[in-house]
Amino acid sequence: MSAAPKVLAICGGVGGAKLALGLDRVLPPGDLALLVNTGDDFVHLGLQISPDLDTVMYTLAGVVSQAQGWGREGDTRRFLDEIVRCGGPGWFQIGDLDLAVHVERTRRLAAGESLTAVTAGLARAFGVRSLLLPMSDDPVRTLLDTVDEGVLEFQEYFVRRRCEPRVRAIRFSGAEAARPSATALALLDAPGLEAVLLCPSNPWLSVAPMLAMPALRQALAVCRAPVVAVSPVVAGRAVKGPTAKLMQELDLEVSAVTVAAHYAGLIDGYVLDRQDAALLPRIGLTAVALPTVMRSLEDRDALARGVLAFARGLSTGPRLRMVS
Amino acid sequence: MSAAPKVLAICGGVGGAKLALGLDRVLPPGDLALLVNTGDDFVHLGLQISPDLDTVMYTLAGVVSQAQGWGREGDTRRFLDEIVRCGGPGWFQIGDLDLAVHVERTRRLAAGESLTAVTAGLARAFGVRSLLLPMSDDPVRTLLDTVDEGVLEFQEYFVRRRCEPRVRAIRFSGAEAARPSATALALLDAPGLEAVLLCPSNPWLSVAPMLAMPALRQALAVCRAPVVAVSPVVAGRAVKGPTAKLMQELDLEVSAVTVAAHYAGLIDGYVLDRQDAALLPRIGLTAVALPTVMRSLEDRDALARGVLAFARGLSTGPRLRMVS
């Protein structure tokens, strides 16, 4: 019998999955639960697609494309080329191996299984040992209000339009009513929980959909374990993806300080990159500078160990965080 | 401007598709319409699958697997192997190329397009020049009442159970209420129609679902063009598939005579194989013996020409057939 996970990591796709992999590797089996963003989920070609869940699952299963950070290593696009030939859309990449997960997820959801159950089944089939949790079984959809192209769904913005449209606001349709993962809520309330980690995912696109669910935000605010965030902004640049461009469009300074301020009231500790050590005095809470740029597997393991050690050092008993 | 098709061929999958290809090749472009069985259609992995429509489309597009007679030449099973890995069913063959058609069909049907419209769009994308018509946009499901395993859906019987269960009755759920292809009904009523051909498909499994729709049976009975059937039974054996085994289980003599008797009242002429020329006196209507076993492309063309010539020779004006 394995006990309940002791660490809950909250993450989105590629960026967060790197730290998730390190955590999965350095923690004893069964000690890690991952709460994953589903605000990017969408229906495409009639298929239920959960990009972040797939990225995390493929990463932890060791089958992710090393070059992309998402999708399957060695995948092919025979199916997708045929879809285009049939007159269908080709802008969203779906490999022949990758497709199996989408079809199987769609089939099981249509048969009445919850996304939580489907995710657990797929993760088991892929040999993932950590607990993989969708943030909710209810639909939450990240919508981007753009200056020139109106409101875009996440994948329309992110993939089809390659993050080119200027964003003026982001909202999370359905988040107010969505019930967060019951397992995650129970973990946050469990006495054995040792740390909650916000992985270096995009705070506004990948973590925000989760925090937009009132019950999850509340559970984080009152949980006894320390909550630590890792900055995805390093030396004034985003390590990955559109974070920096988005921050500029939202009139935010592209800096690890901004991310800390964004999470203020919700976290007990903050990890920024050692290149940003000079910013430590500007972070208004306990913070540490660590090498956060993960290129090798060893980088991932080292950051995971460093973040866990930092979080455990913060573990000084119950506290009450702000609920904004 | 192309005029309305002059020949309507009625067919199921592999066996009928061979003659369909010959007809497609020897007739002027636009002269052929194919009314295809959809009684074998089913939902699998959440996908809308139309095996006979696909077989005919792939055959006419020149992309069908030469070895199998169905599916795509040179297809791979990366997707299907992954489905099995994910815990899904692997018994129904879906190649990576083949899958595109299922996904695109499912997507368009879910978007509200009719099966007729989806089929036309796919056929156009595949460069098929003849008119491909599903027998109906309404669901008709072929069900097999078996001696030992109860009622099986067609694909359960045909693929999963490899036609092994003994059949005692066949029925076509939904056929009474299904509206036949409006285009086919219009063609059957058009003065320009020169021939209706029942391809050498399984009369009880592939052609019967169509004839089970009262309006189609009625339209065939009153159409002015000659109706000609080609026997799928040659020398007491079925050329392809479970026809012979099924006939035995239904206590029918496995003979071209039985097929002619089955179609009696509905057809004006009958084509059997030259190996069965001795049976001609036992066929109670105008019949001809032709080489019906199609191995090469030339065989297909020759039979198509022979059947068309035979049918046109029967074209002696209006007649009224029996409606059973």
Image (spheres, coloured by chain):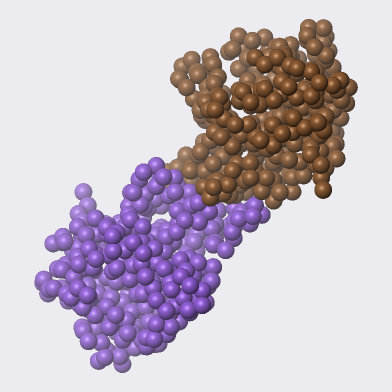
Chain colours: A purple, B brown
Q: Position of residue B91 (x, y in %)?
A: 52, 36
Q: Position of residue B162 (x, y in %)?
A: 56, 26
Residue drawn 53% across the image and 50% down it = B111
Residue drawn 48% across the image and 79% down it = A147
Q: Position of residue B112 (x, y in %)?
A: 54, 47
- In this orientation, which residue lies closer to the viewer: A212 or B185? B185
Res B291 → quadrant: top right
- In this orientation, which residue lies closer to the viewer: B307 or B215? B215
**Direction top: furthest residue:** B282
Picture layout, residue B83 above or below residue B68 = below
- Can residue A177 be seen by looking at this rendering? yes
Res B301 → quadrant: top right
Picture layout, residue B5 above or below residue A214 = above
Residue drawn 50% across the image and 67% down it = A156
Picture layout, residue A215 above or below residue B44 = below
Q: Is residue B210 left or right of residue A26?
A: right
- In this orientation, which residue lies closer to the viewer: A320 or B319? B319
Residue drawn 39% across the image and 73% down it = A170
- Can residue A60 be seen by looking at this rendering? no
Considering the image in quadrants, where does the C terminus of chain A appear?
bottom left
